[in-house]
Every structure is written in structure tokens, then in C-alpha cells.
Amino acid sequence: MHGFANPARFLRIARWLMPALLVPGLVMALGALAWGVAYAPPDHLMGVTVKILFIHVPCVWLGMAGWSTIAVSSVVELVWRHPLAGIAARAAAVPGAVFTALGLITGSIWGRPTWGTWWVWDGRLTSFLILLFLYFGYIALADAAQRDAAGGGGAGRIPAIFGLVGAINIPIINRSVVWWNSLHQPPSITMGRSSIDGTYLWPLLIGALGFSLIFGGVVLARMRMLLAQIQTEARLRRKALG
């Protein structure tokens, strides 16, 4: 794992891996959306509104996956002191927050004709809204820690601890529709079983994979940007001290 700790080595890998993720991801995501919107039939209960699931489900999945990335990176940073772990967590925070917000927005659009309301304070929606606020808090803490580190402070571990504590919300989101009875439907896809018809399932899975590849490419792009920013700030400090 520490073999990739060298920023120059990481940047060489990220330079070709980033487009290798983004290009197939865009093709798969756009193809699955076109397939689902054009060829999936309307649902007998929800009509054409059901087709928003091809955006909503990947966004919700990546909102949770983004914080899982932060949590894993935080463990690596705290335990093994890997120099790129904190950068990976920071890089995943903004796209994770964007996908979480999109999941909430598309869920509300879906819920209005299905439930007759834009919002209900049930377990799934409330815990997912909390996830968005956690992202905002993490981004603010990470930015403050970066400024503190640039000034010679030692607050770098605080965002990692926050990332671990916030991970408690991920299983709550996942199991909320099982633990609490609400308007939100129960899980449609579980281990080895799916209640979704294949007409919807295959474009949904392909789209989720495509969006995941896009997420990975964006995280790599942000890691490259953050590394460049850190290197630039280090050069400016050296010049100022010189």
C-alpha cells in the first residue's frame, strides 16, 4: 500500500487511469439512461415516473459509497499514516455530496406523484438528509485542517475522526426501510435476489456501474488537483522563507 505513497508515482498512475474510468463510465451511464428511458415500459402503478430510478438509485448508491470512501481513507490515515489517504478522503467528499444532493432531489421528484408529497420525515429520507449535512461538515473541517496544516498547526486528524464517526449513518441509511415502517419501499435488490423486472434491472445495474466509474475518475481528478495545490503552496512557502 505504501508503494503508492509517492506522489509522483501516484500521479503517473492517475494520469492514465482517470480517462480509463471516465470514458467507459460516461458511455455506460448515458447508454443505460437512453436504454431505460426509451425502451423500459411505464410501470403499471407509477407510470413513466418510475424511469427516474435510473438516476435516483445510482445517486443514492454513490452518496453512501462516497462516505464509505471517506471512512476507509480515514482508517488508513489514522492507523497507517498513509500520506495520500487524507487527500483521497477530501477528493471523495465533494462528488459524494453532489450525488447525495441529487439523490434527495430526484427522490423528491419521484415521491411527489407517487406519495402525493415532496417530502416525508421517514427513516430513509431523514438519515440520507443527515448524510448531506455530514458531507458539508466534513468539507468544512477538511478545508480548515488544510489551512491549519499550511500554517504549521496539527489539526489534520480531526477530519479523519469525523469521517469515522459519520460512518455510523451508512448502515442506518441502508437498514432504515427495514427497521422503520414508512412510505419508502423496502429494499428491491438484496444479496442474490431482486424484485425488479429485468427490463429495469439491467439498465439500472449498467448505469450504476457507469456512474461508479465516473465517480472514481472524478475522485482521481480531484486528488491530482489537491496534490498540485499542496505542491504549489509548498513552493510558495519556500520562496517566502528564502
Image: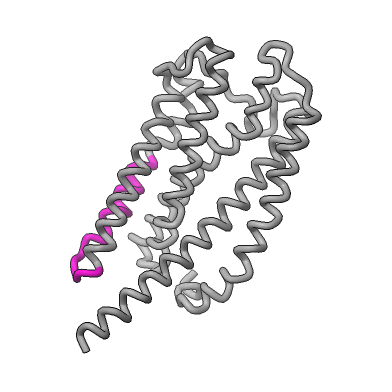
Of residues 42 and 153, the one nearer the viewer is 42
Number of residue marks: 0
The magenta span reads 150-167
Residue 149 coordinates in the image, percent (x, y) = 24, 67
State the scheme by which the image is colored: one colour
Quarter of the C terminus within the rendering: bottom left
Q: Is residue 190 above or below residue 83?
A: above
Relative to residue 14, is residue 75 drawn left or right? Answer: left
Q: Residue at x 31, y 55 (%)?
A: 142
Residue 65 coordinates in the image, percent (x, y) = 51, 44
Q: Residue at x 66, y 14 (%)?
A: 46
Furthest residue to the bottom? 242
Q: Is residue 207 above or below residue 92?
A: above
Main secondary-structure element of the magenta-colored stretch: helix
Q: Residue at x 34, y 50 (%)?
A: 139
Q: Residue at x 52, y 18 (%)?
A: 184
Residue 166 coordinates in the image, percent (x, y) = 35, 41
The quadrant where residue 132 appears: top left
Q: Is residue 153 within the magenta segment?
A: yes
Of residues 38 and 174, the one nearer the viewer is 38
Relative to residue 103, is residue 130 drawn left or right? Answer: left
Relative to residue 76, is residue 154 drawn left or right? Answer: left
Q: Is residue 132 within the magenta segment?
A: no
The quadrant where residue 238 appears: bottom left
Q: Is residue 29 above or below residue 56?
A: below
The quadrant where residue 86 appears: bottom left
Residue 1 coordinates in the image, percent (x, y) = 49, 69
